[in-house]
Image (tube, rainbow, N blue to C red):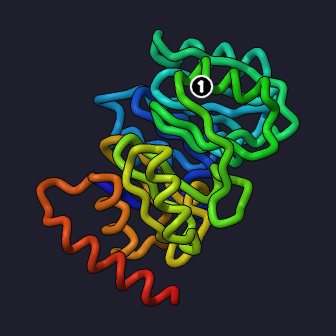
Amino acid sequence: MAQRAQYENSNEIGVFAKLTNSYCLTGMGGSQNFYSIFEAELAEHIPVVQCSLGGTRIVGRVCVGNKHGLIVPSTTTDQELLHLRNALPEGVLIQRVEERLSALGNCIACNDHVALVHTEIDRETEEIVADVLGVECFRQTVAGNALVGSFCALSNNGALVHPKTTIEDQDEMSSLLQVPVVAGTVNRGSDVIGGGMVVNDWCAFCGLDTTATELQVVESIFKLQEGRPANIASDMRNALIDQLA
């Protein structure tokens, strides 16, 4: 199921939240409304944790994680780290890394098996990502953008990427990730996919401006629709791409 949400009038859900198959982080402060939308949908299955990282609320952009682990930047305080350790499930590893490109969420996109990383990220950080998250890492760009985490959203079922990603690039990413890849938008035409939505294997949250067509594409590529015919989604996706063209 794909839902719409908003953080204090901002549609950039992926900036203020991090969603995986074993936990969900949301930015501290802000409106309780934002947190409660996630809690209503997820609380039965996984913990929803309000936190800050390095004193900021933009948790979705500065950390990277999957069901196996969570990697946070060096600016994270000991108190924040302790709060996360106490709140997250036991099997989830948490690791702090020293990395020049400290907005890890912008530089790394991952699911539970594969990670796409910024082409200039440290070799050491890449190894930590591989170890802590239990993934295979590939250095990659999305439509010529080095910030892979900003311009694509990944789950174990599919990937949504920047609308100007070429067919060749989509095919290459699809073979790396072993999931179907589709180009599209969120938040009424925004190409910042990672910043505009969060997704795991059974639900997705997009900004309040996301159109019905975009929402349908999201539900289709991430296989979130319950028993709805798939061809509707491909028609909708073509309509989206026609509009962009």
On the image, the x and y values in percent for residue 40 come to 34, 41
Vertical arrangement, residue 121 with respect to residue 160, above or below: above
Of all residues shown, which one is farthest toward the right?
A: 100
Secondary structure at numbered mark 1 = strand
- 6 or 183: nearer the eye? 183
Where is mark 1, residue-wise? 70
Q: Is residue 41 left or right of residue 101?
A: left
**How packed is label 1: few (under 14 Cα within 10 Å), some, or many (20 or more)?**
many
Q: Where is residue 127, by image quadrant?
A: top right
Q: Is residue 232 above or below residue 79?
A: below
**Which residue is more in the foreground, 72 or 235?**
235
Amino acid type, residue under disc 1 in the picture: Leu
Q: Is residue 213 visible?
A: yes
Q: Identify whether 13 is placed above or below 245.
A: above
Q: Residue at x 57, y 66 (%)?
A: 162
- For residue 76, say whether it is visible: no
* Residue at screen point 62% across, 40% down: 138
Residue 59 coordinates in the image, percent (x, y): 66, 40
78 or 229: nearer the viewer:
229
Q: Is 190 left, or right, of 157 in this rendering? A: right
Q: Examine the image and state in which quarter residue 240 appears.
A: bottom left
Q: Which residue is drawn at 59% across and 25% down?
A: 70
Residue ID at (40%, 48%): 37
